[in-house]
Image (cartoon, grey):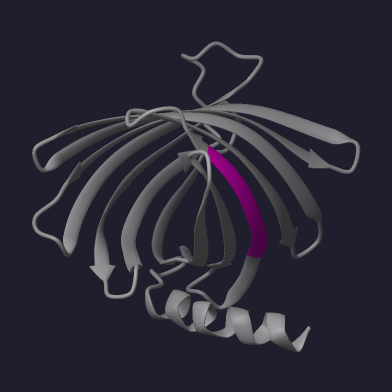
Amino acid sequence: MLTRKLFLFPILLLSASYAIDDNLSRGSLILEKELPFNLSIELEQSLRLEDQSRRFKQTFTEVGLSYDINKYIKVEIPYRYAIFKDKKKQRISFSSTLKIKKNNSTFRYKGRIQSTYEDENREDVVRNKFTYEHEINNKYEPFLSFEILSPYDKELKNVDDYRISIGSEINLPNKTSLKLYYIYQKEGLLEEYLIKNNIIGITCNLKL
């Protein structure tokens, strides 16, 4: 238990530092290891805060296995266990990513189907994410992305949530990188009450 608290403490500090008034902040640590046969495994520990980063929103642990079919296409199967203030959720997903790179520019499309379980309830969601990245040099790689989320049993035009993200990947020594980002999110588009979020986040990625 003590180890877990120590693990989350630096993420908490980083999240608090990048909070926006009455909105959300996120901090994550990702460990990534390449395996034989074009496989890789990834472990992520994340903490999310709300209300000027004064209140706990959720923490989750996610482990995912990915397979590079070729240099353009990758498939992933991540599993997430999330703890909220008053509930716990589990999520299993299947996603496929298409990557096209030309010179210093990269275009990515990720399609994902995810199922989230809470007690006896299950929610299925389809996600489509488009990302453009541009490598300025060996250190900085800014990106812009747009993502839409739709209930699985609805048509694609019935979007319930969309997100616009902007940020940059910063490459550091020893196979380490930081990602700083801002997300503007609208959720509940199919509901009576619309929720708007401004999210500031930081992710540290370590390749083992």
Q: Residue at x 52, y 39 (%)?
A: 37
Q: In this rendering, is residue 7 above or below 129? A: below
Name the residue at the top extreme: 155
User: Which secondary structure is most common in the magenta stretch?
Assistant: strand
* Residue 162 on the magenta segment: no
Place residue 170 in its image quadrant: bottom left
Q: Residue at x 45, y 52 (%)?
A: 197
| x then y, percent, for residue 6 | 63, 87
In the picture provided, is 119 more to the left or to the right than 205? right
Q: In this rendering, is residue 45 above or below 148? A: below
In the picture provided, is 3 more to the left or to the right than 26? right
Q: Residue at x 80, y 55 (%)?
A: 88
Magenta residues span 58-66
| x then y, percent, for residue 162 | 43, 35
Name the residue at the right extreme: 120
User: Which image quarter holds the N terminus?
Assistant: bottom right
In the picture provided, is 165 more to the left or to the right than 77? left
| x then y, percent, for residue 73 | 39, 27
| x then y, percent, for residue 191 | 60, 30
